[in-house]
Image (cartoon, rainbow, N blue to C red):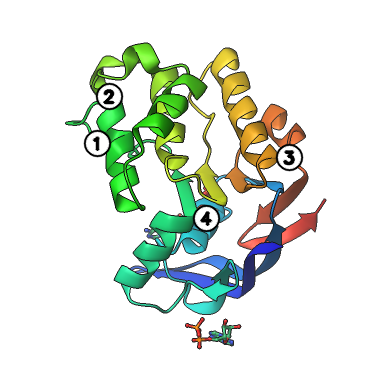
């Protein structure tokens, strides 16, 4: 089943002096159970593309379908509803609310989705090896623990699609391995993932690698 499809998406950024073409006609598809790594130099459009897939950003041209429904050019409330129910998002840093404990961050995400499931909350905490740190605030846990907590938040509503922007850029090798295990588990349950990364180790675990250069897809390996 096709879970994501982009149709010729373009994204321009305008400043006073210059115009940046961040995406220049990007077309690709993701099927359920597939892990796709997006690689490419810094500034090639990876983060912009991921934001367009989640509906956090709007392309200036083209459109995106998520689970067969258009997510682009909708009211923000509608995009947010699709996002909360179907998509888990891992961003580089701002994934956790600083005033909420690890477990309350996960609970909040569950509330935004459908319902708070205390049983699943404990399973998630075990899965990311953070049960013993569940009452800690984000400021009280390490970088690797934060990365795992962010992933637990993304997986809170058991989304069919996981979108992760460089999820292992700031973690040690052991945490990277744990995060790879979590992606494998998500895939085994039929989930799909699109992951931007500079890590060859992570890309080696993907089913497919898409390479972006200057806002264009240059290879579909
Ligand atoms: P990557 O994730 O591959 O590093 P980005 O998607 O962050 O690439 O950026 C693609 C291009 O768009 C870059 O040239 C970047 O400078 C530009 N860009 C990204 N976000 C903005 C923004 N908010 N305003 C202006 N230019 C931006
Ligand atoms: P929905 O009924 O899912 O709310 P629309 O009625 O707006 O969405 O669009 C129906 C279909 O038309 C979309 O699923 C897509 O295949 C196609 N579509 C949407 N936007 C565009 C567009 N900008 N250009 C071409 N086709 C589009």
Q: Position of residue 63 (x, y in %)?
A: 55, 76
Q: Residues within 10 Å of mark 1 (few under 14, many from 20)?
A: some
Marks 4 and 3 in Cβ contact (< 8 Å): no
Task: Look at the image and tell me in which quarter the N terminus lies.
Answer: bottom right
Task: Please name the residue that numbered disc 2 is placed on.
Answer: 138
Marks 1 and 4 in Cβ contact (< 8 Å): no
Front of the two marks 2 and 4: 2
Q: Is mark 4 within 8 Å of ligand 1?
A: yes
- Specify whether residue 154 is in view: yes
Disc on res. 50: 4
Q: Secondary structure at mark 3?
A: loop
Task: Please name the residue that numbered disc 3 is placed on.
Answer: 206
Residue at the image position 30 percent from the left and 28 percent from the top: 103
Work out which residue is located at the far right of the displayed protein and give it.
221
Q: Residues within 10 Å of mark 4 (few under 14, many from 20)?
A: many
Q: Secondary structure at mark 1?
A: loop
Vertical arrangement, residue 186 with respect to residue 33, above or below: above
In which quadrant of this rendering is ligand 2 seen?
Answer: bottom right
Q: Residues within 10 Å of mark 2 (few under 14, many from 20)?
A: many
Q: Position of residue 201 (x, y in %)?
A: 71, 27
Residue at the image position 73 percent from the left and 40 percent from the top: 206
Q: Quadrant of residue 150?
A: top left
- Specify whether residue 96 is in view: no
Marks 1 and 2 in Cβ contact (< 8 Å): yes
Q: First in sequence: mark 3 or mark 1?
A: 1
Task: Please name the residue that numbered disc 1 is placed on.
Answer: 97
Front of the two marks 1 and 4: 1
Q: Secondary structure at mark 2?
A: helix
């Amino acid at each position: 089943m096709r879970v994501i499809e982009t149709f010729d998406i373009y994204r321009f950024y305008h400043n006073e002096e210059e115009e940046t073409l961040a995406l220049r006609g990007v077309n690709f598809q993701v099927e359920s159970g597939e892990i796709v790594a997006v690689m490419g130099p810094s500034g090639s459009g990876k983060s912009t593309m991921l934001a367009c897939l989640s509906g956090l950003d709007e392309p200036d041209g083209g459109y995106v379908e998520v689970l067969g429904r258009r997510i682009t050019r909708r009211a923000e409330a509608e995009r947010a509803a699709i996002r909360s129910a179907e998509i888990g998002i891992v961003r580089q840093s701002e994934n956790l609310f600083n005033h909420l404990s690890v477990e309350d961050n996960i609970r909040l995400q569950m509330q935004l989705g459908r319902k708070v499931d205390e049983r699943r909350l404990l399973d998630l905490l075990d899965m990311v090896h953070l049960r013993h740190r569940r009452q800690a605030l984000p400021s009280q846990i390490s970088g690797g623990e934060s990365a795992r907590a962010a992933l637990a938040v993304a997986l809170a509503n058991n989304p069919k699609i996981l979108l992760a922007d460089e999820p292992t850029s700031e973690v040690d090798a052991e945490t990277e391995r744990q995060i790879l295990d979590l992606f494998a588990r998500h895939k085994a349950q039929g989930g799909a993932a699109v992951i931007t990364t500079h890590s060859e180790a992570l890309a080696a675990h993907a089913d497919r690698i898409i390479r972006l250069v200057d806002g264009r897809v240059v290879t579909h390996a």
